[in-house]
Image: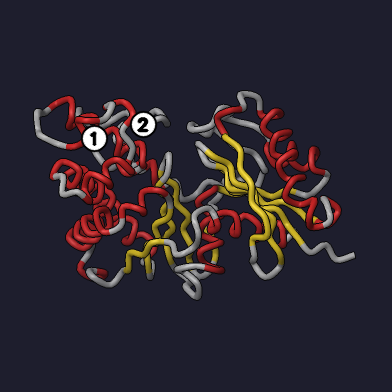
Amino acid sequence: MQKPYVLGLDMGGTNSVLGVVDARGHVLGRTSIKTQAYRDINDYVNALYEEAEKIIEPLGGMEMVRGIGAGVPNGNFYTGYIQEAMNLPWQTVPFAQLVSERFGLPCRITNDANAAAMGEMTYGAAKGMKNFIMITLGTGVGSGIVIDGNVVYGHDGFAGELGHTTAVRGENARPCNCGKMGCLEAYASATGVARTAKEILTSTTKDTLLRQLDVDNITSKDVYDAAEQGDEVAKEIFDFTGTILGQQLADFIAFSAPEAIVLFGGLTKSGDWIKRPIEEAMNKNVLPLWKNKVKVLFSDLKEADAAVLGASALAWSE
């Protein structure tokens, strides 16, 4: 019997989203669990299975599922391991094997940003493109590099860790969760935006709506809301963040000459507040050969769909 469905998993540092996908790329059911709620990887896999049963049961049960594809932080396409993932409770685990054993189905994994890139190339803003870079702006900063229509995995399966290229050097560089100093992730993630807000609020006396909030719990959404009300400090935060990201994108362009940079994740909800400084800094710092030629696009897929659909593509190839 031809099995008509696959499961696609988008594992983020905060939430894990699981979807049932058919061969035409329709997400027929979706559920989620809190990634950080499970300190033991086996408890996480068991919770995932229980949630999967709920969304596949109305479609005929697990026997209708062909396989599982997962986009996970530091997921190794070759070995099936999650390796040294700084934003997860379990840093190195044989994830594909554990999932396959619990579900009784084949499982393939890749980096979460690579999965998002595959989804975007098939169904979203990068449809029809052969060369682009996907940047995911969430708890961390991930990336998927597509060259000549293929995701770049590199020699060991970990190519494309652009979030851990050095954006700021010197004594003022921020520490990153990876152990390095000055990584792009420490500035351009949603967490990085919150850190920038806290630095400004604690080191200056500038008047801002953000002072009405608990400085330790400010989010990028709070900064966006303040910017929409004309708050100058909020605008300064987005200008700072976008400038750093744009400068790094200029360097990334020199490597692979993409048609576009596709941005995905919660920070993109800030719209032009973040996009304008990104484009300005990128075009100011890029080699003249590519100035004003590389598009900066926001994902036009529903939130989580890009990664779920991209991850599911791995399962169809089983």
Q: Badge 2 is on which residue? A: 176
Q: Residues within 10 Å of mark 2 (few under 14, many from 20)?
A: some
- Res 74 visible: no
- Position of 125 with respect to 308 (left or right) is left
Closer to the camera in the image, 13 or 131:
13
Q: How many marks?
A: 2
Numbered disc 2: secondary structure: loop
Instruction: From the top left corner, tell me how far across and down residue 248 is, in percent.
Output: 29, 51
Residue 174 rendering spot, x and y as whole percentages: 28, 31
Q: Secondary structure at mark 1?
A: helix
Residue at 61 percent of width and 43 percent of height: 32
Q: Is residue 207 left or right of residue 104?
A: left
Q: Nearer the viewer, mark 1 or mark 2?
A: 1
Instruction: Where is residue 146? Give x, y as percent.
Output: 48, 63
Please give the label number shown on residue 197. 1
Hey, what amino acid is under mark 2?
A: Cys
208 relative to 152, above or below: above
Residue 23 falls left or right of residue 161:
right
Q: Quadrant of the C terminus?
A: bottom right
Mark sitting earlier along the chain (1/2): 2
| Distance from the alpha carbon under mark 1 to that under mark 2 | 17 Å
